[in-house]
């Protein structure tokens, strides 16, 4: 048996139509993270991917926006229900709410010239050779095989109501006697893969190389579904060969084969968030990884935007229909982007509380001090508007008048001129805060606005961003803590200090049953030399992303003593509370993406 396999492999390779994996190749199963698969992530999971611009992220899922939430400018499009919509975003938002209202063409709806897709020479329903009729053209055309992939095939199947997309991109179809493919031209088509109609994809003219050169499709139906080899189970119920998981290609159709990856194979790129994206998406001018690294360090020569234009220009002569991808990008660029997490004048403070270093004015513009009666009781984090984030164990909801929020402060013995004192309007403690276990140790403080402007004006503060996904930063990332808390020897601290700590995974090994993975985060240093301590509570653990944007990843919460290497500091995991925070402060204040 083995010998036959080897012989076959040799023969195959000689004929160069099959690749024998090298002995050292990891098996595809090793690229996939099992624990992550249980979460059943798809293209609608906004902790892993960005939502479409006509969607917003609620509780980790992309849901439809209402059409009025779309940007106003754009040109009208026609949908399959015969209605015109003011923009593509309006139509897609409407379609998202009422599937079936599919895109037909760019422009107003007219009686003649509908876009059509038919399948020929197969069973004509779920399989066949793809034939299209473009708007304002009266002849049907076939699709060239050279541009055809599972991306486009999935779109054709979605369009025909096969929710799991395509099983395969080809099959030998039994041609009828009277095959007449008389045209020498065919159409190349290019989709993103998540369109709901082929009409949204781009078409260019190509050369027909006969029947073999034409694209076909087999849509996934339950009876096609019996797995032929060891197979990967997509979230949508389709099964695909394991070797197609984590290769940057959305074979499943719901992207579930690309979202739980430890590594990527083939022509693909691994995002830090564990997502494989196609290599062509790296440096293409659009951020695909939620962690942003696919558009960083792109060389000037191949600047993403210019590359895009060049390829458009090259295609221009043959372009039949431009597709809606450029419009999708434009809509994205028109959405409001709140500002957070960027220091005014980034100083090179690089090089690295307990064991910390003194801070300078402007280095921690989100850091606030929470004063109760005559004492700095805790730290806090300015997150925009009138809102400050802190630990629940720092505050009580009833004595708001005894609190003050000091912003712009460095030294509380000799306050600097940037200091501004604010009074407190309201305190919101998490409804499931547990003072014994310190679960949900998170609270919001609303500052009293200026009575004239009705706004909070805090000139020397800049809000820290709220992380919307637990996948934005991984274990071992170096982040920064800051505060007026005690030194190791319990020495008092008057001036703001900061230090670098690393995110620690598997923290239950240190705190066993006291640590709650979903709600808490640990951070520390190998030798315990840098740590938060008494008085730092409520203050920030801030992590910086690849674009130098600062996120409040944790709130100083608790820990066994201070500065002990075997007991890292424990922080409230802010990403877990994005929806709780936005429900109180309003989505628009803190949402950067997926609005
Ligand atoms: C505290 O008592 C405290 N080393 C805060 C942080 C840590 C320990 C104690 C973490 O507020």
Image (cartoon, grey):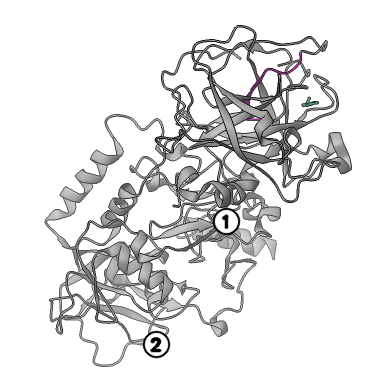
Q: CA distance from mark 2 to mark 1?
A: 35 Å
481 magenta-colored: yes
Task: Decide if residue 65 is on the left or right side of residue 568.
Answer: left
The residue depicted at 65 percent of the width and 67 percent of the height is: 230
Quadrant (top left, top right, bottom left, bottom right) of the N terminus: bottom right
Of tags 2 and 1, the one toward the viewer is 1
Q: Residue 295, position in %: x, y?
A: 40, 38
Asked whether residue 190 is in view, the answer is: no
Q: Is residue 470 above or below residue 170?
A: above
- Image mark for residue 125: 2
Please identify the quarter of the rendering in which residue 185 is found: bottom left
Q: Is residue 306 in view from this perspective?
A: yes
Residue 535 spot, x, y in % from top left: 74, 22
In the picture shown, does residue 486 fall above or below 429?
Answer: above
- At label 1, counting other C-alpha atoms closer than 10 Å, the crowd grade (few under 14, some 14-19, many 20 or more) is some
Q: Quadrant of ligand 1?
A: top right
Residue drawn 50% across and 32% down? 463
**Depicted 106 relative to depicted 313: above or below:** below
From the viewer's perspective, tell me whether residue 174 is left or right of residue 368: left
Q: How many marks?
A: 2
Q: Tell me residue 386's x, y (percent).
A: 51, 37
Mark 2 and mark 1 lie on one chain; the one further toward the N terminus is 1
Q: Nearer the viewer, residue 73 or 228?
A: 73
Q: Which residue is mark 1?
A: 60
- Residue span colored magenta: 476-486
Q: Position of residue 588 (x, y in %)?
A: 45, 48
- 559 or 239: nearer the viewer: 559
Within the magenta stretch, is there residue 106? Answer: no
Left or right of 238 in this view: 267:
left
Q: Is residue 577 left or right of residue 54?
A: right
């Amino acid at each position: 048996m083995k010998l036959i396999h080897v012989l076959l492999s040799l023969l195959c390779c000689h004929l160069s139509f099959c690749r024998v994996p090298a002995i050292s190749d990891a098996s595809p199963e090793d690229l996939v993270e099992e624990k992550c698969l249980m979460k059943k992530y798809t293209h609608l999971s906004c902790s892993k991917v960005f939502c479409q611009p006509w969607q917003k992220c609620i509780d980790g899922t992309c849901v439809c926006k209402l059409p009025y939430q779309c940007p106003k400018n754009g040109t009208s499009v026609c949908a399959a229900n015969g209605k015109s919509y003011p923009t593509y975003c309006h139509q897609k938002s409407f379609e998202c709410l009422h599937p079936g209202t599919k895109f037909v063409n760019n422009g107003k709806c007219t009686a003649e010239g509908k876009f059509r897709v038919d399948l020929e020479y197969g069973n004509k329903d779920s399989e066949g050779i793809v034939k299209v009729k473009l708007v304002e053209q009266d002849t049907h055309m076939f699709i060239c095989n050279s541009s055809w992939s599972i991306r486009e095939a999935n779109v054709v199947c979605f369009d025909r109501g096969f929710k799991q997309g395509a099983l395969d991109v080809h099959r030998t179809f039994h041609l009828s006697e009277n095959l007449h493919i008389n045209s020498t031209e065919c159409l190349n088509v290019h989709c993103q893969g998540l369109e709901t109609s082929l009409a949204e994809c781009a078409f260019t003219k190509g050369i027909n190389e006969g029947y073999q050169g034409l694209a076909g499709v087999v849509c996934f139906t339950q009876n096609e579904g019996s797995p032929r080899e060891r197979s990967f189970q997509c979230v949508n119920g389709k099964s695909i060969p394991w070797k197609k998981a984590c290769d940057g290609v959305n074979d499943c159709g719901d992207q579930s084969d690309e979202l739980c990856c430890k590594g990527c194979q083939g022509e693909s790129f691994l995002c830090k968030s564990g997502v494989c994206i196609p290599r062509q998406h790296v440096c293409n001018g659009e951020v695909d990884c939620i962690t942003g690294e696919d558009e960083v360090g792109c060389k000037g020569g191949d600047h993403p935007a210019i590359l895009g234009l060049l390829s458009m220009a090259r295609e221009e002569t043959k372009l039949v229909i431009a597709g809606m991808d450029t419009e999708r990008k434009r809509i994205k660029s028109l959405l409001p982007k709140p500002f957070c997490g960027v220091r005014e004048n980034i100083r090179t403070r690089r090089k690295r509380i307990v064991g910390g270093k003194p801070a300078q004015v402007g280095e921690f513009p989100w850091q606030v001090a929470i004063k109760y009666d005559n004492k700095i009781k805790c730290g806090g984090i300015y997150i925009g508007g009138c809102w400050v984030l802190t630990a629940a164990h720092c505050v009580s909801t009833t004595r708001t008048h005894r609190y003050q929020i000091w912003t712009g402060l460095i030294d509380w013995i000799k306050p600097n001129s940037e200091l501004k004192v604010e009074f407190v309007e309201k305190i919101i403690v998490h409804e499931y805060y547990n003072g014994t276990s310190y679960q949900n140790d998170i609270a919001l403080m609303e500052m009293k606005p200026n009575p004239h402007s009705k706004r909070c004006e805090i000139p020397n503060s800049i809000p820290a961003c709220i992380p919307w996904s637990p996948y934005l930063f991984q274990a071992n990332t170096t982040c920064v803590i800051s505060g007026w808390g005690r030194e190791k020897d319990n020495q008092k601290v008057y001036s703001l200090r900061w230090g670098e700590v690393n995110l620690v995974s598997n923290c239950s090994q240190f705190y066993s049953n006291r640590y709650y993975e979903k709600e808490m985060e640990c951070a520390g240093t190998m030798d315990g030399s840098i740590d938060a301590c008494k008085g730092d509570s409520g203050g920030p653990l801030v992590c910086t992303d690849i674009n130098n944007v600062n996120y409040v990843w944790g709130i100083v919460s608790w820990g066994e003593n201070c500065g002990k290497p075997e007991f890292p500091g424990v922080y409230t995991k802010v990403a877990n509370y994005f929806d709780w925070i936005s429900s109180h402060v309003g989505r628009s204040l803190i949402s950067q993406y997926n609005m």
